[in-house]
Amino acid sequence: MSDARSLTPHTTARRATRRRLLLRLLAVALICGLSGGVLAALTGAGVWVFGLLAAVAGYLVAARLWRLEPGVPVLTYHSVSDNAAWLPWRSEISIRPASLDRQLRLFRRMGMQIVDSETLARARLAGRPVPGNWMALHFDDGYLDNWVAAAPILRRHGACATLFVSTDFIAPPQPLRPMLGQDGPLRWDGYLSWDELRALEAEGTFRIEAHGTDHGRIATGPETVDRLTPENEGRLSWMQWARMPGDKHDWYLRRSRPVPLGSAVPVSAPALAARGWSPATGQESDAAYDARVRAVLATSREVIAREMGRAPVLFCWPQNQTSDRARALAREAGFLATTAGQARNTASDPAAILSRVHIGEDYAGFRCGWIDDLAVRAQIRCFQGYVGWVAVLGAVGALRRAVRLLTRMRVWGRGRGAGSGALQEGMS
């Protein structure tokens, strides 16, 4: 249930804002540096040393004094696993349990207070001032590893989080499975059962909220963008899900493919965010779109209410995309707030929309705990309006791109070193 496609528009907008802020900061530093250089030239001092010191000082002053309206960080996680090999999109959404543990220690050192998302949403909707150290944690999709690893780690730190589940992916009834620190083999693949979800909510670690039914995508036009191959079929699992009515908790274990290899991959979008298209009926009408979205909202709300003993009040849009019409339908269905915002949850932002940032690991392109801590700290501080931290994110991003470039060059070099014969064999 990767959010990789869906995070793109949200991430692009956030990065554009960060670039603008960074350019302004660098402009302040450049002006200070040039002023320092001129002063150094007039006084006979070391031009470059004086100018560099002036630039650094200018940047630090601007970063310290320049703060935007404060916002509330909402951090999003998905899988927390020591073995996420079963997930085709694991590189984008899965982190190691040790990383979550380290990040929770970081939040404590930063003086952050983790609050339940419903508490946050109700405070914002009521127009009440929100403390500057509040933050919220979200876990999407309902992976079993949230029970195995995330729950005991959160419990150890006294933290709470919101868990958004898609009802078609709930595992069947079975005995509660082992967690970290308990006897018995740990299972890392699969999804949570209703008994496990009820146990998590009863102990106060997670509050269960709605993530729709099938986490699907929908064809939006007649264009073909690809063909289904052994290499891409994992990342395009939504095509198989669309042909699997009802329960999908074991989709990754099924040998039969409802959609065969070689099938056309249509242009698509998250199912709740856009009007669909089919060869038989053409573009979906507004009325048909409304009816489809209403059905998903109602089903997810009814199923969670029946299983958890209370109706959900928050809705997380699959793949972090939605439409203005879908938001209105969610309000009509009784949801207090929904996700997929592109702001920072400030007092000026719409109170019924939660903006989030996805949290990962190995931000530098390799495993390094202190760089990860720095990147996560920077994302939190940017949400809180501290403009200077944009430069930190830019530096970490530049390092990651450099590491990836070097990695590709190394792989390319090895391929050349293997000789043309090896290439021919691989192509046969």
Image (tube, rainbow, N blue to C red):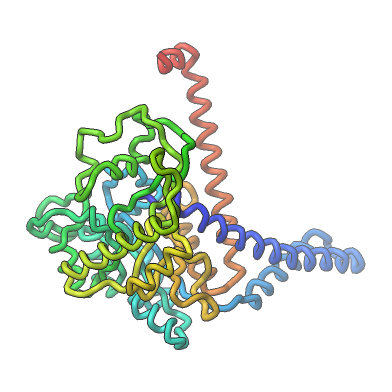
Query: Picture quarter containing residue 178?
Result: bottom left
The image shows residue 252 at horizontal and vertical percentages of: 24, 41
Please determine whether, in this image, residue 367 is positioned above or below residue 393: above
The image shows residue 403 at horizontal and vertical percentages of: 53, 43
Residue at coordinates 52% horizontally, 41% vertically from top-left? Answer: 404
In the rendered view of the protein, which quadrant contains the C terminus?
A: top left
The image shows residue 22 at horizontal and vertical percentages of: 65, 62
Comparing 378 with 294, the one in front is 294
Residue at coordinates 40% horizontally, 56% vertically from top-left? Answer: 289
Residue at coordinates 47% horizontally, 75% vertically from top-left? Answer: 72
Residue at coordinates 41% horizontally, 52% vertically from top-left? Answer: 270
The image shows residue 379 at horizontal and vertical percentages of: 50, 65
Query: Picture quarter containing residue 302?
Result: bottom left
Taking the image as shown, residue 60 lies to the left or right of residue 51, namely left
Q: Residue furthest left?
A: 175
Residue 85 visible in this rendered orientation of the protein: no
Residue 219 visible in this rendered orientation of the protein: yes
